[in-house]
Amino acid sequence: MKLFKKTTSYILLSVLTSLSVSCKKDFDEVNTDPIGKSTTSANQLLAPALVNVLQANMLRNRNFNNELMQVTVDISDAEGKIFRYDVRRNWADYTWNTCYPELTNLRDIYTIASQPTSTNSSYKAISLITQAWVFQILTDVYGDIPYSQANQGKEGNLQPVYDKQKDIYLDLFKKLEEANTLLAEGAAIIKTGDPVYQGDVTKWRRLGNSLYLRLLLRASGKSEVSSQVIAKIKEIADTNKGNYPIMENNSHTAKILWNGTNSSTAVYSSPFMINVRAVDFRTPAITSFFLGNLTNWADPRVSGAYGTNGYNRFGIAGGPAGLIGVPSGYDTGSSVVKQSYFYSDAQNASVTLQTDPYTGIIMNCAEVDFILAEAAAKGWISGTGEAYYTKGIADGLNYWLPAKFTSTTDPELLSYIRAADIGWSNSLPLDNTATNAPSKMEYIHLQKYYAMFLVDFQQWFEYRRTGHPFLPKGTGLANGGRMPARLNYPLASQSTNPTSYANAVAAQGPDNINTLVWWQK
């Protein structure tokens, strides 16, 4: 027994000694990840960041924006239904928690592209444009947010201040000005790392200036900046157009074309496929407001056949009586029955938004047309607004029905506009929100509403800015029937950054859905 114990001890000692030597021998080489990298390039950061933000935007568009803005109704008498303006505090977390980490990556693109060994003016500009895009969404959702000190965790700043929305907007204007100047240099970028424009920096420049117009228009109602904002809109659209190229057709629309499903080999996959079950995708009913206008107009996106099996372009399934919607904001206990909904992939339809490669829209040309239509109607730029308005209708339709209308004078387009009774009239007043009577602003924003279908929160933002389009108010609405003006700050921001949070609330107002952000006041 003693011999056995002694032998065992020698064996264990030998093994431990061997392990010790082995652990020291070639330690650095063995413990180095052969695949991972300690550094990265601007090209490698761009696509993942854009895809992640866009996927999050699309999901919130589907289950939040669409419910508020009467595209869909998640039929139920349960509490916490967005279509009734019953917005719970946990809705605030997702956009915040997705966007801020990706802003670190987008900011790092600028840092990398500024280094002597990898300097590239186009990547610096794209970083500024994409940061402006994400920060615009964040500040329009929440109001005052971390901005000037955001994404500085690596530098040790874990409790950034919340900047005022006015200051954020003014700095975003500077970012987009710088981006326009940088992109004029035309420095090449890597095509395969650009999921939006495949390396075409001239189109990135158009996106930057189009986004600039969006932001300028949103701030135009504030007296303290309106004169400079209107002057810049005129410079971009009229007096200095050559130096500020903008989107002019759907080839300039900023989108990520989904080219995969939920398989492991996909490059860019729609979140409607990888995050939403087929049964859930077809669950919400389509509203009578969204569908009623389209059917009344005999709109080609829902009338006529499209695809091999004759499905409409929006992939909408009708009930026994056809394409019939349900009212939004109805009272509980009303026994509303779903009739029309969006087809899901499991139904073997040839056209569904769940699998559609064109749903990944960052910003489209039709929105730019309607921005210019509003500016012209208000006398800020030349024209009456009619030409831009008509072009917006054409570009909005042509995005989903490629090249259906060859120009704004296409007889088929003009026939559609006449039959739908949506033609421009210079005799209309500019606005008439007091009585909900027809006006140029209502005409513009009703068409803009459909042009911005699927585009993150933009329908909600524009409704908050303008009060258009006129949405019918159901008697079952919560929150006193008031459209939510913002989302509250995420709960984590209160516990991890209490001082800055408290300062933001003191400056902006109570942290609830009815506190107006700067450009709404």
Image: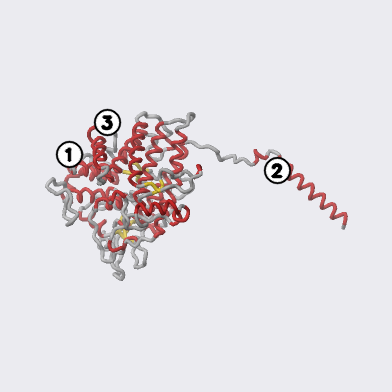
Image location of residue 417, percent across then percent down: 18, 48
Q: Which is nearer the N-term, disc 2 or disc 3?
A: 2
Q: Give whichever of 318, 179 is nearer the camera.
A: 179
Q: Residue at x 43, y 36 (%)?
A: 110
Answer with left or right where residue 340 lies relative to residue 130. Answer: left
Q: Residue at x 13, y 45 (%)?
A: 426
Q: Give whichever of 111, 9 is nearer the camera.
A: 111
The kind of secondary structure element at disc 1 is loop
Answer with left or right where residue 295 lies relative to residue 177. Answer: left
Residue lying at the far bottom in this picture: please name it.
333
Q: Which mark is residue 23?
A: 2
**Residue 360 vertical position relative to residue 78 in the rendered view, above or below:** above
The kind of secondary structure element at disc 3 is helix
The residue under label 1 is 383
Q: Which mark is residue 449?
A: none
What is the basis of the colouring in this image? secondary structure
Q: CA distance from mark 3 to mark 1?
A: 18 Å
The residue under label 3 is 242
Answer with left or right where residue 404 lies relative to residue 428. Answer: right
Q: CA distance from mark 2 to mark 3?
A: 65 Å
Q: Which is nearer the N-term, disc 3 or disc 1?
A: 3
Q: Which is nearer the N-term, disc 2 or disc 1?
A: 2
Q: Amino acid at mark 3?
A: Gly
Q: Amino acid at mark 1?
A: Gly
Image location of residue 71, percent across then percent down: 30, 56
Q: Are marks 2 and 3 in contact (CB under 8 Å)?
A: no
